[in-house]
């Protein structure tokens, strides 16, 4: 795509009006979210801002809202979260995905408690476990009023279109921060950050941007050029890995054998069904002989950089078998806390045994 790169550009004509126009739009159109303070109000509790930002990494707002509310009811302060039972925390996280976030969440909470509270700058926040540059800037801006540019995917899209930035991430991310920093108002930096996020989520959408509803449409370079729906440019994605394995559903008197996955790796520390390693080559081993039933098709599940085909083998026994690893025996109610991958396997296994 041939679009002039704005590396040497300055904010567009009328840039002094951008914060005022954007904040005026935000005052009328801000999303009501449980972790936010209303436009113009005092900043929210940094614990709420931090918790929501960690949950929102790679996860959508509608998915996060009930998890956020449940976490807040169960662990209302950073001190409560730091003291939480780790396994209970991991079970409560089930369904949000990217489970390493949950492990780092509690480690971060404990560090905050040891320090006597959250750092109040992006630089200080960025030194905590699980907090990257975007999250640090978001917390510092929204909860502590630091005048710092906050750039997430929605904001990148707004900046790419407003200034016709042709480069994909990560170059776009760097340029967006540099372009936005002089525009961040000292009076309401957190509201400005959230206004940019909401503009991207509600108006400057990935497909079919609603330019007629945009408070900045008259200074949008991509709109002028007629290329808004072609920006931002997409970064080339790395090839996804593919792996296979087998999950074993071992049922005895209505209870199912579970084990905890290793701390390192996908679904680390989460409860799951025992099974083989996940490898590129086919692995359909069984742990002991018996009247196993095998699913004709594997359960398919996608992680960030991995597509998994997990074959399912199920058996129902009257006595607990000899097994090389320790198993915890869970009833039907306890299976609800399994990661979504294993909930898919459970559905397949039960259907096998009922045939």
Image (cartoon, grey):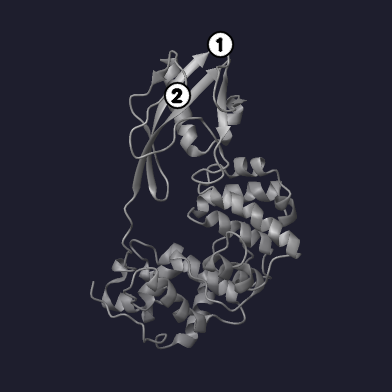
Residue 199 numbered mark, or none? none
Q: Please give the name of the residue rendered at 59% of the width and 79% of the height, measured from the top-left corner.
A: 147
Secondary element at tag 2: helix
- Say above or below: 155 vs 79: below
- Say above or below: 129 vs 169: above
Crowding at dot 2, Cα within 10 Å, few <14 / some 14-19 / many 20+, comes out as many
- Say above or below: 39 vs 103: below
Quadrant location, the N terminus: bottom left
Q: Please give the name of the residue rendered at 26% of the width and 77% of the height, measured from the top-left corner.
A: 3
The answer for how far apart the CA atoms under marks 2 and 1 are is 17 Å
Horizontal relation, residue 68 to residue 111: left or right: left
- Say above or below: 349 vs 244: above
- Residue tagged 1: 318
Camera-near label (2 vs 1) is: 1
Query: x and y percent of residue 132 in the render?
Result: 54, 65
For marks 2 and 1 on the same chain, the one whose residue lies earlier in the sequence: 1
Query: x and y percent of residue 25 in the render?
Result: 51, 73
Regarding residue 33, the answer to whether it shows in the image is no
Quadrant location, the C terminus: top left
Q: Please give the name of the residue rendered at 52% of the width and 67% of the height, measured from the top-left corner.
A: 134
Horizontal relation, residue 173 to residue 26: left or right: left
- Residue tagged 2: 349
Q: Residue furthest left?
A: 2
Query: x and y percent of residue 209 in the render?
Result: 36, 65
The image quarter containing residue 333 is top right
């Amino acid at each position: 795509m041939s679009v002039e790169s704005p590396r040497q550009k300055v904010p567009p004509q009328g840039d002094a009006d951008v914060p005022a126009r954007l904040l005026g739009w935000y005052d009328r159109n801000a999303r009501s979210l449980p972790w936010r303070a209303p436009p113009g109000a005092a900043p929210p509790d940094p614990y709420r801002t931090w918790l929501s930002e960690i949950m929102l990494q790679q996860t959508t707002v509608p998915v996060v809202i009930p998890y956020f509310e449940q976490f807040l009811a169960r662990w209302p302060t950073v001190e409560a979260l730091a003291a939480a039972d780790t396994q209970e925390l991991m079970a409560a996280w089930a369904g949000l995905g990217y489970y390493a976030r949950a492990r780092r969440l509690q480690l971060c909470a404990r560090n905050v408690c040891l320090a006597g509270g959250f750092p109040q700058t992006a630089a200080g926040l960025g030194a905590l476990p699980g907090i990257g540059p975007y999250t640090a800037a978001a917390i510092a801006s929204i909860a502590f009023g630091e005048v710092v540019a906050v750039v997430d995917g929605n904001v990148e899209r707004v900046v790419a279109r407003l200034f016709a930035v042709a480069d994909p991430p990560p170059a776009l991310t760097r340029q967006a921060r540099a372009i936005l920093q002089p525009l961040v108002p000292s009076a309401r930096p957190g509201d400005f950050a959230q206004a940019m996020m909401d503009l991207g989520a509600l108006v400057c959408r990935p497909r079919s941007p609603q330019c007629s509803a945009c408070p900045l449409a008259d200074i949008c370079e991509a709109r002028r050029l007629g290329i808004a729906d072609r920006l931002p440019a997409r970064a080339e994605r790395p090839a996804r890995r593919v792996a296979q394995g087998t999950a074993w559903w071992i049922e005895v008197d209505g209870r199912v054998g579970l084990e905890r996955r290793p701390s390192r790796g996908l679904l680390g520390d989460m409860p799951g069904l025992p099974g083989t390693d996940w490898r590129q080559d086919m692995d359909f081993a069984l742990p002991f002989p018996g009247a196993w039933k095998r699913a004709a098709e594997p359960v398919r599940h996608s992680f960030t950089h991995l597509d998994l085909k997990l074959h399912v083998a199920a058996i129902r026994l009257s006595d607990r078998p000899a097994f090389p690893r320790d198993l915890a025996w869970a009833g039907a109610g306890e299976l609800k806390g399994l990661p979504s991958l294993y909930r898919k396997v459970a559905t397949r296994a039960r259907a096998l045994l009922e045939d």
